[in-house]
Amino acid sequence: MAKLWGGRFSKNTNELVDAFNASIDFDKRLYNEDIRGSIAHAKMLAKCGIIPVEDGEKIVAGLKDILADIEAGNFSFEVALEDIHMNVEARLTERIGQAGARLHTARSRNDQVALDMHMYMKREVAEIAELLINFEKALLTVAKKHDKTLMPGYTHLQRAQPITFAHHLLAYFNMLQRDFRRLLGVWEGADMMPLGAGAIAGTTFPIDRHDVAAQLNFGKVYCNSMDAVSDRDYVIEFLSFASMLMMHMSRLSEEICLWSSTEFGFIELDDAFATGSSMMPQKKNPDIAELVRGKTGRVYGHLQAMLVTAKGLPLTYNKDLQEDKEGFFDAVDTIKFSLAVYRDMILTMTVNVDKMQQAVSKDFSNATDLADYLVRKGLPFRQAHEVVGKCVAYAILNDKFLPEISLEEYKEFSELFESDLLEALKPYNCVAARKSYGGPAFTENEKQFAIGDEVIAAQEKTLAELQANL
Ligand code: ARG
């Protein structure tokens, strides 16, 4: 097949080179953006008197036909035509003749691919924002249902202090809010229009880059042609956002795995969100959580790969940059899948309230509260810590928990203990008393729920703005 750049060559490309060089297998994903970008470019060329108006019209109509064909599955992508840009352009000229051959005036594939990637990323950012909001909503819904569900909070994976399941889930809700903020940062980088930078140094034609930007709803235009064609910061920013999001989901996954084990028994996943074993009939495995945890490594890998790819590149475009796509696309698919499946998995899981309550009753997670009790009676905290430490050791020795020790026994450790200590030890009271700002107290959670609703409403408003600018 004749190459669109074949003029100075006297031989056909080696077959292996064709196969190695081609990106069509994966960049065909950009067909919609490539065509919409070309339509905007052609309209601008006609408006600026760079190509005849009739040619502009023919190009636009021809491109719309190609778009329809691709969407109907009637388009065969050719490896010999390398990438999506040349597949579309060659087909256009084949169909409309001369006019098609004018489309690439004042443009290079270097700024074209950059435009496609920016447009595609904006679309994915908007879709991911919606999935992220839906996942946040799911966490908030389950948290609200479990505002009174007591459970042990852990440090070092050892029971530490009583909390509520709501408080635990709200921690993840807060992480996701930061992910949302980072996603908006990704949008900022993507919402910049590179077309018109040409191969590297702009063009001699009187183009109007701001017109193209306005047609395609871009907020900004790259103001340096060399930066425009070589910038991949926005891809790295996306992968860094994706890595952080996966890290948060992976931490939750680890907890889901722990909580659904017989040892914890805190939750049970819905049958539709778990899998069995081919050999062991009793098994119900949290594969989804494990896969999200596992896929996190792969997304980190894409970030690392892109950072390394970019680090040694002289300005401006180098073919290495074609490597920006597969990892990015894979990260997009991975996080979209993870967010969607997690939302429903969280909404359908059964929370074993009794199991959690039991775990927080038969343990020493109320020890800090006993120390705080002594502090309120006047003892300096360090001494109170020491006294309660001795009480704990005594309880362990006698195979008891703190509420099971008698007042007489407590008096041996400190005269300050009185009968009201039992109230201080009740997990419900321990939680209720932790009213410090951001603490797990029920009253604090109520405030967090209200803030959460406001956050979601604001995010939904932002999402509508993004969608209006695709
Ligand atoms: N397929 C290429 C990419 O994805 C398009 C740009 C190619 N430009 C060039 N001069 N070879 O990066």
Image (spheres, rainbow, N blue to C red):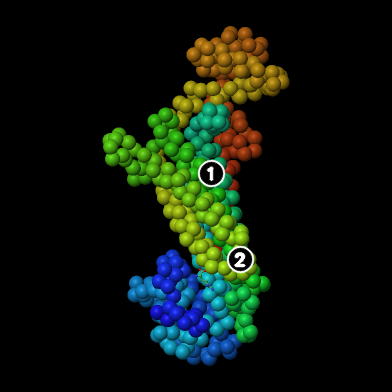
Which residue type carries mark 1? Answer: Tyr
Q: Would you call the spot at circle 2 few (<14 residues within 10 Å), some (14-19), or many (20 or more)?
A: some
In the rendered view, would you say 348 is above or below 417?
A: below
Residue 340 lies, in percent from the top left, at 43, 52
Q: Nearer the viewer, residue 337 or 104?
A: 104
Disc 2 target residue: 231
> Closer to the camera: disc 2 or disc 1?
2
- Asked which quadrant contains residue 49, the reply is bottom right
Which residue lies at the image location 56% right of the left edge and 46% below the top edge?
175
Viewport quadrant of the N terminus? bottom left
Numbered tag placed on residue 172 in the rendering? 1
Residue 123 lies, in percent from the top left, at 50, 65
Residue 256 lies, in percent from the top left, at 45, 39
Which residue type carries mark 2? Answer: Asp
Residue 81 lies, in percent from the top left, at 43, 75
Horizontally, residue 312 falls left or right of residue 256, namely right
Which residue lies at the image location 50% right of the left edge and 59% below the top edge?
328
